[in-house]
Amino acid sequence: MLKKTTAVLSAVVVATALTNQKAYAWKSPTHEYIALKAIELLKVDGYIDAYELYSKYEDTIASHTQKPDYKGDFDKGKGWHYYCVTDVHGNVQKASQSGYRMSGKNLLSPSRYCRTARTIFEDNYQSALTFYKAGDIEKAMQFVARCVHMIADIGCTPHTTNLTLTSVMNSKHKRYEYHTSSVFTRFEAKHGDADVYDMFMKDKLFGDCLNTLSDISANSYDTVVKAPEESLLDETIENAVCLAQQYVAGFLVRFYTDAINGKVNLLDGGRYYIRNVQTGKYLSVLMTRSGKAYNCHLANAKRVTQSLENCSAFICSINDDGSYIFTAENNRILSAKPYTVSEQKKLSFGFKAGETPNGFRLSDKLSSYNAVLCVEEDKLALKAYNPDELSHHWVFEKA
């Protein structure tokens, strides 16, 4: 096992050097090292069934932990996966009422909760479960690896303290990551943490797990910013790399448990009514009077025996990129905006679906997932995500 892991890591380091790949936060080999060492911890800590599953897909997991940092990737690309406890000066920032921290954008911006490391994690977790339940284990492992990437970034101090690559502290971020790339293979957790395993098993939607990790990560702000020499970062980096391995191990056990026990909220091929949390109204797709376009809207549904009238039932299907298409009768596809019959064949429809404490967040593919489907003045709209707005959340009811 160790020989295989070493071989994978060596190949990755060589490939990274040859392509001059620039991946921010932890560099690509660090992400892969954390993932592979976490898989080893499962064996050490006695989670043999989970270990046997993941060890079969080590190459897939190793390669896909780096994908979110690729330019143009649907998970934003390099330098974007932030979940900020503090601002760039180390001042603690208040989380949302539902417990979400902010991205590395302007912390006063309306889009401050859009596409954080946590929301991307939530989206990828749902996709991984759907692929697993559909029998596509290889694809599920690709999205598990993307979740692993986000956990590791939340354990990386520059990514929880808003030391973005466009901030006044960008040099501190770069110093930290480049020094990490030269020392990370020295650091290996000898075993997992029982409390971390327990936390992942009890935390239904991972908010406590990810917030705890981000708090620990942010506590190293002063060291990362003020250490006069790179060597003085070693202890902080050791703690971060080992802790990331333990948190990833906890996550892997949790995903294995959910997957084996059949937990999945959205089935590929499942049929659902989709209800807005705030209004209680359901989504529907109708042909316009002209007969040339489709228009999605909200409807007051009426329950008749086991079904609902006056709203659409949608068939759920998952795309290769983990987004979902929801198709009503007569091949009418759910979209935030009206579209013509001819456009239906050209547009790239889809939503990322992440489960939150308030319901599902549906991030629109046509906005590069930067806007969510919501209700504004009783009409459908696309807005920057606010985790505290009930109108930004949806419930899936089996049809």
Image (spheres, rainbow, N blue to C red):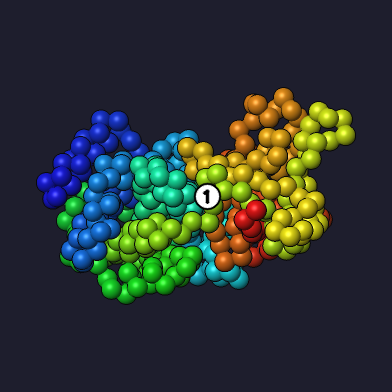
Res. 179 visible in picture: no
Q: Residue furthest left?
A: 3
Where does residue 174 sit, x and y in percent of width and height?
A: 35, 49
The x, y position of residue 192, in whole percent, is 24, 67
Query: Which quadrant of the structure image shows residue 142?
Result: top left
Q: Residue shown at 21%/66% (left/top)?
A: 45
Q: Residue at x 64, y 58 (%)?
A: 397
| Residue at 37%, 58% in the rendered image | 260
Residue 223 image position (x, y, % from top left): 33, 65
Work out which residue is located at the far right of the displayed protein and give it. Answer: 289
Query: Along the line of sight, which residue is nearer the eye, 275 or 124?
Result: 275
Q: Quadrant of residue 43?
A: bottom left
Query: Residue type at mark 1?
Result: Leu
Q: Residue at x 36, y 53 (%)?
A: 148
**Side of 127 where 179 appears, left or right:** left
Residue 77 seen anywhere in this rendered image of the structure = yes
Q: Is 127 situated above or below 389?
A: above
The secondary structure type at the circle numbered 1 is loop
Crowding at mark 1 (Cα within 10 Å: few <14, some 14-19, many 20+): many
Q: Which residue sits furthest front?
A: 305
Q: Residue beneath label 1, please?
A: 267
Please tell me how many numbered marks the rendered image carries.
1
| Residue 396, x across and y down, in percent | 62, 56
